[in-house]
Each structure stands twice: as C-alpha cells, then as structure tokens.
Amino acid sequence: MKVFSSIPNFPSEDKTIITIGTFDGVHLGHKVILARLDKIAKKTKYKSILLTFFPHPRHVLQKDDQDMKLINTLNERQELLKKAELDNLIMHQFTKEFSRMKSTNFVRDILVEKLNVHTLVIGYDHHFGRNREGAIPELKVLAELYDFNIEMISPQLFQDVTVSSTKIRQLLETGEIEKANHYLGYHFFINGEVVKGNGIGNTIGFPTANILIKNKWKLFPADGVYAVKVNINNRSLKGMINIGKKPTVGGGGKDKSLEVHIFDFSSNIYGHKIKVRFIRRIRDEKRFEDLEGLKKQLFIDKNRAIQILG
C-alpha cells in the first residue's frame, strides 16, 4: 500500500477505483467496502484508492465541539488499512476551505480530473461536498455526465444492528467491549508510551505501567478494569488495565489514567512504546477504604483476567 499525504501528490495517469470516507475503526462494514473495492480493482486491472481525511471534519467545522473521540488515531487507521488489499491511501488534510467546495466541483475537479476515477464504491448513505449537499441521486447524475461507475454497498448488519463507527463509539463509551470488538472485527486497542506514575502499585505487589496517549481525540473505553493483551518490545503478554481517576489512591481528580499490570513481567519499560488490546471488561472502577482493600480486589481481578485470557 502506497501512502500519499494529499490529493495533488497522487499521480493519476491511469484509471482508478475509489472509495471515500473517514473509515474510523476500519470495522466490518468498512471491510465489506474495501473487499468490493479490491475485487473491482483486480477485475479491471486498475489501482484502488481510499481517500480519507484528517482531522475529522467535525473537529474542523465545529471548533466549539471537540468532545467527539475517535476509535483510531490516524496512525492506527493506517496500521489497520495495511491489512486490506489496498493499493493506495490518500490522507488529505481537511480544512474549512476544502469543506466549502461544492459537490459538483468535488466530483469534477477531484474525482474525475485529479484521481481519474473509473468506479466509485460508496456506502448507501454517502454524502459529500459543501454542507454535505451531495447525495446518491446527484452522484448518479454526475457519474453519467462524467462517465464513471458507482457501486453502492448496503448497510452491514450484525445481530440485526447496522454496523457503524458511531454505534461502536457508543459501545466503547459504555464499556460494552465484547460487542464493540465483534463490530470491529478485531480487539479494540490503544497505542501509547510508558511513563512514570506514583509507584503505589509496587508497594502492594501490583506494579503498573502508566500509559500516555498523546492524541487528544483518542477514545478510551468506559472507566473500569479490563482483561487485556499487551505488546511491548516484540513480546505478547497478558495483563489487566484500570481506566479511571484512581479514587482510592489518586483522589478521584479530573484526569483519567490508564495503568496496566502485566502478568509475570518485571522489566523497566519507561519510555517504551506499548500496545494494549482490550478483551473483556471485568468490573467498574471502585473506591476502597484503604490499600489493603484495593489489594484484595486486585487479586480477584487478576484471577478473573487469567480465566478470561486462558
């Protein structure tokens, strides 16, 4: 997969098979679109393109509303898309100026003139252009005018529920990690850096790696304790993570912390990159009267996590 940082950087001499979207989560619905994209590309012998945008349009157009978190950072999205049989990924910067482009101009100037589209593969509810004014009926007219094909993908259902990035975000925010994982088609994960904490975990026999996430829009699952799998220094390990405000030892402040206890592991990993995959939620975050009460609960949590992880 070749990655391009903007639309003008993409060479467009040959015809292309294109899909468009933010693809947050790269979930099961997205994978159906990508599979269809790949199938058409192989049949026509043309190259496939995913045109995606950053930052998320909502973060650009609604400056006062930065609360919406994303399932993936841009790097995580790119990591997931590498697993698809995709020829080209264009990550174009979304700006207010770009958002003002009319839908007809977007099709003519970007899809036709710049990217040389042969077939456009899109979801059933696709909108594009200024104020999302462009919809399927208009797109069909423009496709006939500019001589390209349209393939529409119907909504993908799982247990009679439409799979969408919005639905998955809601599940993660309420701690329904297993259902979210089903919709994603993989275990939800975070990537971060191990930083120093207050060291209290060491005093009760449960040392933790404190994880720093630098991306302000990265979504965290609901506060609580989860059984997780951890990748660090090319090793795959098991553990449990607490997400929350540490009400017992941290005073329950405003800032959330992510602290993972890795089983049977004692190396110094400060400053190292870490990846944590969420398998199952164990319990809500609790406040205990003292450290002894917390320690007893952590033993229970660890045994439960071991059972879950096998």
Image (cartoon, helix red, strand yellow):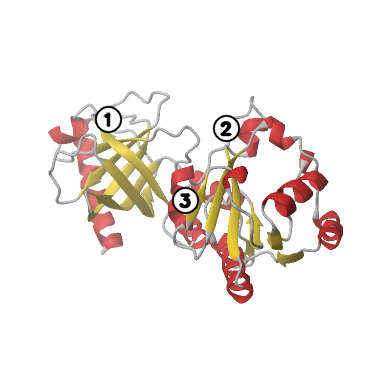
What is the quadrant of the C terminus in the image? bottom left
Q: Distance between the residues labelled 3 and 1?
A: 44 Å
Count of numbered labels shown in the rendering = 3
Is residue 29 visible to the viewer in this orientation of the structure?
A: no
Estimate the x, y position of residue 27 in percent, counting from the top left: 53, 58
For mark 3, what is the residue?
78
Q: Mark 3 belongs to which amino acid? A: Gln
Q: Which of marks 3 and 1 is nearer the N terminus?
A: 3
* Residue in the picture at 39% in, 23% down: 253
Q: With 185 as the anchor, is 30 left or right in this view?
A: right
Estimate the x, y position of residue 207 in percent, counting from the top left: 18, 39
**Label at residue 235:** none
Q: How far apart are marks 2 and 1 (CA)?
A: 33 Å
For mark 1, what is the residue?
289
Q: How crowded is mark 2: few (under 14 residues within 10 Å), some or many (20 or more)?
A: few
Is residue 90 visible to the viewer in this orientation of the structure?
A: yes
Q: Mark 2 belongs to which amino acid? A: Asp
* Residue in the picture at 50% in, 46% down: 71
Q: Earlier in the sequence, mark 2 or mark 1?
A: 2
Estimate the x, y position of residue 169 in percent, counting from the top left: 55, 47
For mark 2, what is the residue?
67
Give the foreground label among 2 and 3: 3
Q: How far apart are marks 2 and 3 (CA)?
A: 23 Å
Estimate the x, y position of residue 243 in percent, counting from the top left: 37, 39
In this orientation, which residue lies closer to the viewer: 228 or 114? 114
Q: Which of marks 2 and 3 is nearer the N terminus?
A: 2
Dot 1 falls on a residue whose secondary structure is loop
Q: Mark 1 belongs to which amino acid? A: Glu
Q: With 274 as the anchor, is 106 left or right in this view?
A: right
